[in-house]
Image: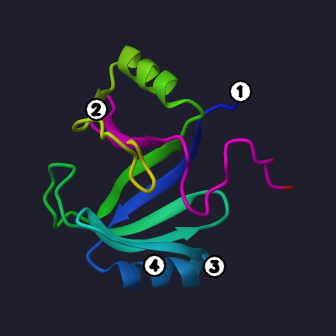
Amino acid sequence: MSRPKLRHIAIATHDPERTAAFYREAFGFEEVGRTDTPLATGVYLSDGELNLAILRFHTDQLGRGTDYVGLHHFGVHVPDLEAAYARLEAAGARPKGERPERATQYFEVKFVGPDGVVFDISAHGWAGARGLDDAPPAS
């Protein structure tokens, strides 16, 4: 069975277009999607391994206000949601809000780790990110 993999990083910004343009120009990341929902507006980039979400959040998910900019959360692609929920609960992670009845486009639910860092888990992964069973890149 596959192991969980880090596959997503979200950055909060006031200007997703400008910030995404910077990362495209500086690193050659490719645009793999966009979002415009009540949760956030932004651009999804990828290097082929990870999904980098550049988002202007419309709601305060971290308790830092909607003016917060910087690293927002990370995401882990898991092979089995129920097993991941059980392991997270046993490890003392607490859900950040209610578990939704159905998944959003990219994540199922956010959690808070022991140091207050927010992360989410997904059984289906993120646009542009390598899957769980994909071979590693050639060296």
Q: Are marks 2 and 4 in contact (CB under 8 Å)?
A: no
Q: Is residue 109 left or right of residue 38?
A: right
The quadrant holding residue 71 is bottom left
Q: Circle 1 — which element?
A: loop
The mark found on residue 95 in the picture is 2
Q: Is residue 9 depicted above or below 43 in this figure?
A: above
Q: Is residue 33 left or right of residue 49?
A: left
Residue that appears at 59% across and 57% down = 50
Looking at the rendering, the stretch of residues picked out in magenta corresponds to: 109-137
Residue that appears at 36% across and 19% down = 89
- Of mark 3 and mark 2, the one earlier in the sequence is 3
Rounded to the nearest angstrom, the CA distance separating label 1 from label 2 is: 25 Å
Rounded to the nearest angstrom, the CA distance separating label 4 from label 1 is: 35 Å
Say which residue label 3 marks. 28
Give the amino acid at mark 2: Pro
The mark found on residue 20 in the picture is 4
Residue 58: percent from left, percent from top:
19, 66
Of tags 3 and 2, the one toward the viewer is 2
Give the amino acid at mark 4: Ala
